[in-house]
Image (tube, rainbow, N blue to C red):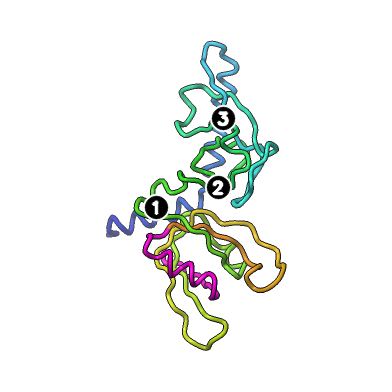
Amino acid sequence: MLQPLHLLREFRRRLLIHRRGIAALCAAAAVLLSLRALQDPGVPTVPVWTVARDVPAGTRLTSADLRRASFPTAAVPASAVKDPSLLLGRTVAQPLERGQTLSARQVLGSTVLDGHPGRVAIAVRIPDAGVAALLHTGDRVDLWATDPRSNGPAELAVTDAVVLSTGQRSEANSGANATGALVVLAVVPAAVPELAAATSTGFLSVAWNR
């Protein structure tokens, strides 16, 4: 018989695998409720902002990414954004599906750490963009640092970091540090100095631990 911790991990794994489908179903349900509300003038509605098209993580939101919609008051999530100025120019922390109701927690900012008490957010560059593309919001990873100037063994830079955002690939301009992709992680404060040093002087490799 599986222990409660194993069941929780399995549930979380399946939730991450099917998160796009769940988000799409939620968006479809919200649209259906809105259409029914529009057909019934007696149901009060409020304006909220939704995603006008599929938006990958790391995208800086513009007016073309937003769409105003009217939802029944009872169907609007408490975290739904009603003022678009809170979203424009902000970077998306996770992939978003067309029609999904926008929340301040979905863009980088102080709320991105909600659910991760005692941690801070730090952006690091994963040199291998292919590896960075395998990361998903919510993954828990260890980062190992190697110094390309020496033949020494890899050193553990941080353990049990939570992926908050997977950024888009950066184009190479000059040097190895200009390639790869930026990833935002939630880590314990004590890990920041060593991780920052490893990011600036070493090559970071990713190991999934969940």
User: Mark 3 belongs to which amino acid?
Assistant: Asp
User: Mark 2 belongs to which amino acid?
Assistant: Arg
Q: Tell me the quarter of the image containing the C terminus.
A: bottom left
**Which segment is the magenta one?**
187-210
| Viewer-side label of 3, 2 | 3
Q: Mark 3 points at which residue?
A: 83
- Report helix, strand or loop for mark 1: helix
Q: Tell me the quarter of the image containing the N terminus.
A: bottom left
Residue at the (44%, 78%) spot, across then down: 155
* Labelled disc at residue 20: 2
The residues tagged by marks 1 and 3 sit, at their Cα atoms, a distance apart of: 34 Å
**Which residue lies most toward the bottom here?**
151
Q: Where is residue 89 in the image (x, y as percent from the top left)?
A: 63, 42
| Viewer-side label of 1, 3 | 3
Q: How many marks?
A: 3
Q: Mark 1 points at which residue?
A: 11
Q: Where is residue 25 in the image (x, y as percent from the top left)?
A: 54, 38
- Report helix, strand or loop for mark 2: helix
Which of 197 and 20 lies nearest the eye of the viewer?
197
Look at the picture and state if 195 lies above or below 116. Answer: below
Q: Position of residue 79 (x, y in %)?
A: 47, 34
In terms of sequence position, does the residue under pointer 1 or pointer 3 come before the other?
1
User: Mark 1 belongs to which amino acid?
Assistant: Phe
In terms of sequence position, does the residue under pointer 1 or pointer 2 come before the other?
1
